[in-house]
Image (cartoon, rainbow, N blue to C red):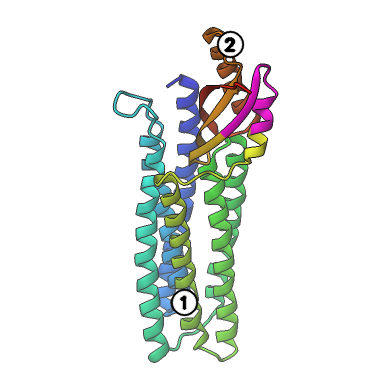
Amino acid sequence: MTIDIQKHYQKIRKILIIVLALNWAVALVKIIYGLSSRCFSMTADGFHSLSDGTSNLIGIVGIHFACQPVDKDHPYGHKKYETLFSLGIAAMLFLVSFNLLKAGWQRLQHPVSFQADLGSFAVMLITSAVNIYVMRYEHRKGKALKSDILVSDSLHTRADIFTSFSVIISLIVTRLGFPLIDPIVTILISLFIGYAAFAIVKQSSDVLCDTAVFLDDQKVKDIVLRIEGVRACHKIRSRGRIDDVHIDLHVQVNPNMHIDDAHQISYRIEEAIKSAIPGITDVVVHMEPRNH
């Protein structure tokens, strides 16, 4: 691994640590104030923020393994470790979702009144402002560093902001005299967390089970057919992560072509595809004779 790549991952790791600290600070404020005021929707949102911080922590550990250089036992690299660690995040989110759903249902059956005071509104507004800052900061840095994990995490934070706004609405409605809205919002938040966990499992399993990456086969064919000496292209396959796509394809050439010329064509095909389509890191070209 080159020094530039190491510096690249160090920048991503530093951003994740900053986001981790902010997420956990927001979580602790929500949980402490939510428990003290018996506002369970705020407490649930706090645990949601806590899970976001934990996902950042798992991401940091995952990146540590994912950025390791290619070795004898891992000739394709270690990037799938990041995908594997994301399943740990999903398991944790499922557990949080179940506990919040259970607690919300119990509160719905046995209501507990609480006072939605100005402090509750202040906590939610301030923490929402911090979340908005985190989302914009992480998204901007993710685009600058071309980091999928930072961009994806910023989009997750954006979804969390809508969850926080639902808690604010719950506080307003409770203030108007409808305390049952609090456990209902808690149940909705738990379902939202469960859906997020399911989405992570779906995306991770697609990568680990070598599901085909969404790729425009016709675009790949057009790139290949522009290479001088190529007569046809077919059997295009893809797998891997969106930032680490491996593809292989069959290319037909003149059967009388010298092997050195065929090798040069193979090399040009690889370079052309990598340059034209971001995220492709490995291209395997199978040469075939074209008799007709």
Residue at 57% across / 15% down in the picture? Answer: 255
The secondary structure type at the circle numbered 1 is helix
| Residue 217 in sight here | yes
Which amino acid, by three-letter code, is at mark 1?
Answer: Thr
In percent of width and height, residue 144 lies at 62, 36
Res 13 → quadrant: top left
Q: Which residue is mark 1?
A: 186
Residue 235 versus residue 275: which sits nearer the camera? 235
Is 232 contained in the magenta span? yes
Q: Please report the bounds of the magenta region as a residue range.
A: 221-234
Q: Which residue is mark 2?
A: 257
Earlier sequence position, callout 1 versus callout 2: 1
Q: Is residue 63 above or below residue 182?
A: above
**Quarter of the image where the C terminus is located:** top right
**Quarter of the image where the N terminus is located:** top left
Q: Is residue 181 above or below residue 218?
A: below
Residue at 52% across / 74% down in the picture? Answer: 120
Which amino acid, by three-letter code, is at mark 2?
Answer: Met
Residue at 29% across / 28% down in the picture? Answer: 73
Q: Left or right: 101 with respect to 259? A: left
